[in-house]
Amino acid sequence: MFSPARLDDREDFARILKERRAERRIRQEDLASLNRMSRFTLSDAENGRTDPKLSTMVNLLQTLGLTMVVVPTEVADRVSVPRLDGPEDVYDIDEDFPMEDDPLGPA
């Protein structure tokens, strides 16, 4: 089951896209066709070789049953996301999805 993921760069997007497509058992050809793009363009996005436009990213994610959520950096450490494996659990964005190199330094 897909878990919430932090999206900081095109490599993150590539990983999310590839994992979710595989989880949903959708072929590249089919996902590309649904989004009116070539399989080669989709392959480039899945392998981090291209930097897709925001509208392309949103369309691909929606086709895969995902949505992108934007939160202000200054409150990101206080955002919690309900876990899908239990009603009492929540994800802590900073603990469960830490940034390797925080450009703003420690909070």
Image: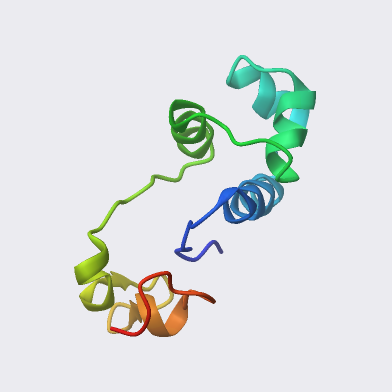
Residue furthest to the top in view is 36
Residue at (75, 35) in percent of width and height? 44
Residue 26 lies in quadrant: top right
The answer to whether residue 9 is visible is: yes
Is 8 left, or right, of 81 in this rendering? right
The answer to whether residue 27 is visible is: no
Residue at (32, 83) in percent of width and height? 89
43 versus 97 height, above or below: above
- Name the foreground residue: 10 vs 15: 10
Residue at (64, 53) in percent of width and height? 11
Where residue 101 sits in the image (x, y, percent)? 51, 75
Where residue 70 sits in the image (x, y, percent)? 29, 52
Where does the N terminus fall, quadrant-wise? bottom right
- Name the foreground residue: 77 vs 82: 77
Where residue 34 sits in the image (x, y, percent)? 60, 20
Is 59 left, or right, of 34 in this rendering? left
Where residue 14 sits in the image (x, y, percent)? 65, 48
Where does the C terminus fall, quadrant-wise? bottom left
Is 103 left, or right, of 40 in this rendering? left
